[in-house]
Amino acid sequence: METVLEIAPGVSLWRERLDRAAQRALLGEVLAQAAFYKPVMPGSGKPFSVEEFNFGPLGWYSDKSGYRYTSTDPRTAEAWPPIPPALIDLWKATTNHPAPPECCLVNLYRAGARMGLHQDRDEQAIDAPVLSVSLGDEALFRIGGTTRKGPTRSVKLGSGDVLTFGGPARLAFHGIDRVLSGTSTLVPGGGRINLTLRRVTA
Ligand code: MD3
Ligand code: FE
């Protein structure tokens, strides 16, 4: 039996659920297709420190005109590539959710990148869980409750770790405080890649 840690209500963590060979295979598939862009904040145009790309029928995109889900890459008008089959299998194996994921957001953290505390609430399907896969450098992940104030906890995530967030955790505040540069050799050029699978439509 593999170990699953229930780190908070609705949050399950499988440490190194993907072994090194599976991490390499998945990373190869991602890097062969991903054309990363630097999202900017709607309105202010302030750039994120994270670079992003999407797989799947719907991609989360942020530029000066706003955050939205799009079926095509706004830069090229081409469909986002399909979600890697290994991730669909992982979703089936870990979530028990009857419907498939629609979005695989790829976040690339080079040295110094972070993601502030936020909620994921641009989806209609808040009944569906979210699945996250970490590849490359370790990171300090923070998760709290459904209000911005209130206690949070910090968890170190490593390469191959898989998390699911469902039920009471689906609207939890969360973020990446920092990436521990140089803790993994997996990602060429260094850094961390996070893959987040979500269902978007009800
Ligand atoms: C908890 N990404 O893309 S993954 C994001 O590591 C995002 O890149 C972080 O937050 C990253 O929105 C954290 C873990 C995660 C993803 C989605 C969640 C945690 C979540 C949705 C609800 C609750
Ligand atoms: Fe998030």
Image (cartoon, rainbow, N blue to C red):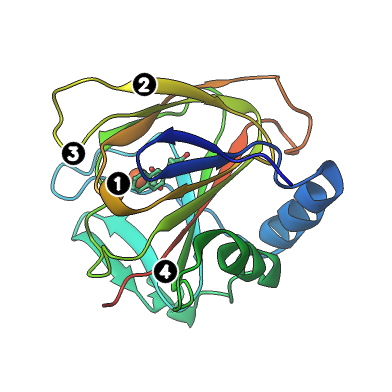
Identify the residue at image location x=23%, y=33%: 145
Q: How far apart are labels 2 and 3 at the CA level?
A: 13 Å
Q: Residues within 10 Å of mark 3 (few under 14, many from 20)?
A: some
Pointer 2 with pointer 1, Cβ within 8 A: no
Nearest-to-viewer mark from 3 and 1? 3
**Front one among 107 and 197:** 197
Q: Quadrant of ligand 2?
A: top left
Mark linked to residue 40? 1
Mark linked to residue 153? 2
Residue at the front extreme of this rendering: 1
Q: How far apart are labels 2 and 1 at the CA level?
A: 28 Å
Relative placement, left or right, of 57 versus 48 is right
Q: Position of residue 47 (x, y in %)?
A: 32, 39
User: Which residue, given by chain and number where applicable, does mark 3 sit on?
Assistant: 146
Amino acid carrying label 1: it is Val
**Mark earlier in primary sequence (4, 1):** 1
**Front one among 177 and 109:** 177
User: Which residue, given by chain and number where applicable, does mark 4 sit on?
Assistant: 75
**Element type where label 3 sits in the image:** loop
Q: Quick check: is the Cβ at mark 4 less than 8 Å away from ligand 1? A: no
Identify the residue at image location x=31%, y=69%: 69
Nearest-to-viewer mark from 4 and 2? 2
Asked if 197 appears above or below 141 in the picture, the reply is below
**Front one among 90 and 110:** 90
**Mark earlier in primary sequence (4, 3):** 4
Q: Quadrant of residue 150?
A: top left
Q: How far apart are labels 4 and 1 at the CA level?
A: 14 Å
Pointer 2 with pointer 3, Cβ within 8 A: no
Q: How far apart are labels 4 and 3 at the CA level?
A: 34 Å
**Mark earlier in primary sequence (3, 1):** 1
**Mark earlier in primary sequence (2, 3):** 3
Amino acid carrying label 2: it is Arg
